[in-house]
Image: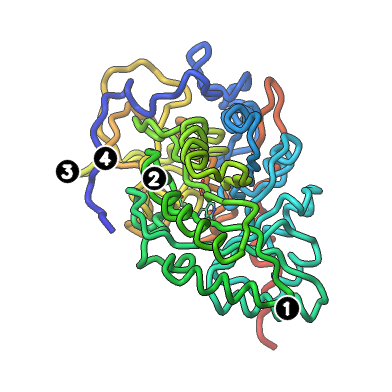
Amino acid sequence: MPTTRQQPLRPRNEVAPMTAASRFHLKNGILHAENVPLPTLAEKFGTPLYVYSRQALHDAWDSYHSAIAGRNVIVCFGMKANSNLAVLDEFRRLGAGFDIVSGGELARVLAVGADPGKVVFSGVGKQVWEMQAALKAGVKCFNVESEAELVQLGQVAEKMNVVAPVSLRVNPDVDAHTHPYISTGLKENKFGIAIDDAVRIYQRASEIKSLHIVGVDCHIGSQITDVSPYLDALDKLIILIQTLAGLGIKLSHLDLGGGIGIRYTDETPLTPTTLLDNVFKRLAQHKLDSLQIVLEPGRSLVGNAGVLLTTVQYLKHSDARNFAIVDAAMNDLIRPTLYDAWHGVEQVCPTGNANTQIYDIVGPICESGDWLARDRRLVLEQGELLAIMSAGAYGFTMASQYNTRPRAAEIMVDNDSYHVVRPRETLESLFAGEQTLP
Ligand code: LLP
C-alpha cells in the first residue's frame, strides 16, 4: 500500500470540483445540501454527521434510467456502498433491484419491501443460513463463486425441496486499472471462478437437479473510469456464452457487475450510457442482444450524494506539518487511510481569506493512519465546519466504533426539509450487550 503523500497540492479554489448537477453547492456564501444550509444540520445534530441529498440519488438513478430505456436491463444497486433503509427504499421506489452479499443485506432489502425477484446474491463465502434465507425469499439469482459453493447450494436447495437459480461469477482475468484493493477481476484475486474452469463447472451445475442455470456474472473492480476493461471482460464472456450454447446450456442473463467510477477530484468516469451502448453493440455483433443485462452499480449511485460534516477541534502547527484535528476520524470514513483515497475538503462557510496554509486533516483516533485528507491548502479556524465530499459511498457502511466512538448520525435532505434516517449512536448502546464476569 502506498502511504506516501501522493495527493497533488491544489489551490483552495480548485478542490473537488463539483459537477453542474451537484446538489451540494454554495448559496449566499454557505455550503448547502439542496436548499438546506449545512451549518443548520451541524448545529441541530452535531458532528461528525453524514448528510445525503435525495435529489442527488435521483440524479444518479436518472443516469442509469436513461441508459437502460428500451433495453432489457435490470439495475441492482450494489447496496454495500450505502445500505441505509432510506436509501434502499428510495431506489426500490425508483425501480431498482439489489445486489446483496450477506444475510444481513438480504434482511435490509426485505425490510424495505424490495421484490426478491430483483435481488442477486453475490459473495465468495455464502453460509448455509444465508442460502436458506435467500432461497426462502426467492431471490432472482445466486452468483456462485466456487465449485464448492455450487455443490453446497445444490444440497441446501435439495433439502428445502426447491430449485436454486444460479449464475457463475467468472473471473475473466482482466485488469480494471484501479486500486489493487478494489480490483477483483484478476487471476490472483479471490473472486469468481477462473474462466478456464467455467465450462466444466457449468456442466457440473447442469447435472445437479436442484440448480437451475440462469446466467453468467462478473465484477472486475470498482472506481473504473474507462470502458475498455468492461469490454475486455465482455469479449471473454461472449466466448464462454457461445461455448455453453454449443453444449446446450442456454443463459438468460449476463451480469456485468458494478464498478463505474465517480468524480472525486478530476476524474472523468465513463457513463452508464457509454457502457451500455458499447455492450449492446458488441452483443449485437454476436447476435446475443436478446440476453438480459444485469448491472450492480454501488458507488456511482450514491458516492456524490453524500458528505461527511466535521468540526475543526484544534489546529496544531509543528516544524514539519500543520494539522487540523477534526471530530471525524478513520472510524467514520476509512477510505483515505485504507486506499489512499482522495476526498475533497470544503469549508462550509468559506471566509475568502487568502492566507492559506497546507494542512493534514486528521482525526482524534490513536493511530498515525487516522487521516482524512493530506496536503490541502486551506484557511482554517478552530471550531469551523468542513465537508468531506463524495462520502455517500463506502462511508457509513464501512464505519466502525473503534475507540468506542458512536457512529455518526445520517440525515437525508429533501429540497428544503430533512429527515434523520439514522440517529447518532448513544454511548450506552455501544456496550449494551456486554457482560462483566461473575
Ligand atoms: N457487485 C459486486 C459483486 C461487488 O463486489 C461490488 C463492490 C459491487 C457490485 C459494487 O461496485 P461499485 O459500483 O460500487 O464499484 N470499499 C471500496 C469499494 C469496494 C467495492 C467492493 N465491491 C471503496 O471504498 O472504494
Tag 3 secondary structure: loop
Tag 2 secondary structure: strand
Disc nearer the start of the sequence (4/3): 4
Q: Residue at x 59, y 35 (%)?
A: 51
Circle on res. 372: 2
**Nearest the eye: 267 or 253:** 253
Disc nearer the start of the sequence (2/3): 3
Q: Residue at x 26, y 40 (%)?
A: 7
**Residue 26 image offset from top left, x and y in percent:** 49, 17
Indicate left or right for 246 with 173 as reference: right
Q: Is the residue marked 4 within 8 Å of ligand 1, measured from its CB?
A: no
- Give the residue type at disc 2: Leu
Spatial CA distance of label 4 from label 3 is: 20 Å
User: Residue 427, can we see it?
Assistant: no
Q: Quadrant of the N terminus?
A: bottom left
Q: Nearer the viewer, mark 2 or mark 3?
A: 2
Circle on res. 319: 3
Indicate left or right for 62 with 195 as reference: right
The 10 Å Cα crowd at callout 2, few under 14, some 14 to 19, many 20 or more, is many
Circle on res. 420: none
The residue that mark 1 highlights is 156
Farthest top residue? 28
- Give the residue type at disc 4: Gln
Q: Is the residue marked 3 within 8 Å of ligand 1, measured from its CB?
A: no
User: Residue 319, can we see it?
Assistant: yes
Spatial CA distance of label 2 from label 3 is: 21 Å
Q: Is the residue marked 1 within 8 Å of ligand 1, measured from its CB?
A: no
Q: Nearer the viewer, mark 4 or mark 2?
A: 4
